Image (spheres, rainbow, N blue to C red):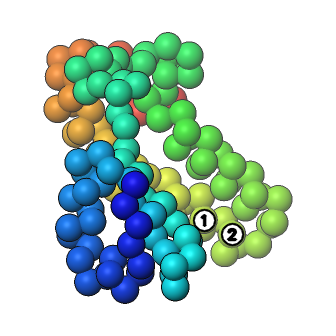
Amino acid sequence: MRTVNISDLKAQLSAHIQLVRDGEEVLVCDRNRPVARIIPCRLEDQPEGERKLVARGPYRFTRNPMYLGLVILSAGIAVWVGTWPFLLAPIAVFATVNWVHIPFEEAKMSRQFGEEFDSYVRKVRRWV
């Protein structure tokens, strides 16, 4: 483990990040007192080649169950609060998710899973 003071970390950030990339831990100190530890990320649990498309559970009915839940929750809160500005929130959430987040994620999934994901898209609707 490498120990470094904050001022040294700021001055040589790239060098310390390279140490972490190489597998070494970096202990960050403020006036020689530890305040943080930078550790390498380990992705051995699920290597890139072994990722699988999940099409069971709630994903049988909607491609985006978490976003669907978020829109329903925001609509429920808007109805519960009962003021018109709150009624705009679920519309804003839906618009952001539908036209920003989901297209980005679906393009990534299509690149990652190819025909398997394209077949899934044809079978399961985006919302419900």
Q: Is residue 123 visible?
A: yes
Give the percent coordinates (x, y) of residue 27. 45, 64
Mark 2 sits on what residue? Answer: 86
How far is mark 1 from mark 2, CA to CA?
Answer: 5 Å
Give the percent coordinates (x, y) of residue 36. 52, 66
In terms of secondary structure, where does tag 1 sit? helix
Which residue is nearer to you in this view: 11 or 66?
11
Amino acid at pointer 2 = Phe
In the drawing, does residue 28 fall left or right of residue 80?
left
Residue at 69% of width from left, 49% of height from top? 73
- Quarter of the image for residue 1 reads bottom left
Give the percent coordinates (x, y) of residue 63. 43, 29
Q: Can residue 99 be seen in this view?
A: no
Amino acid at pointer 1 = Ala
Give the percent coordinates (x, y) of residue 64. 47, 35
* CB-based contact (under 8 Å), mark 1 and mark 2: yes
Mark 1 sits on what residue? Answer: 89
Decide: is 81 above or below 21. below
Residue at 40% of width from left, 25% of height from top? 45
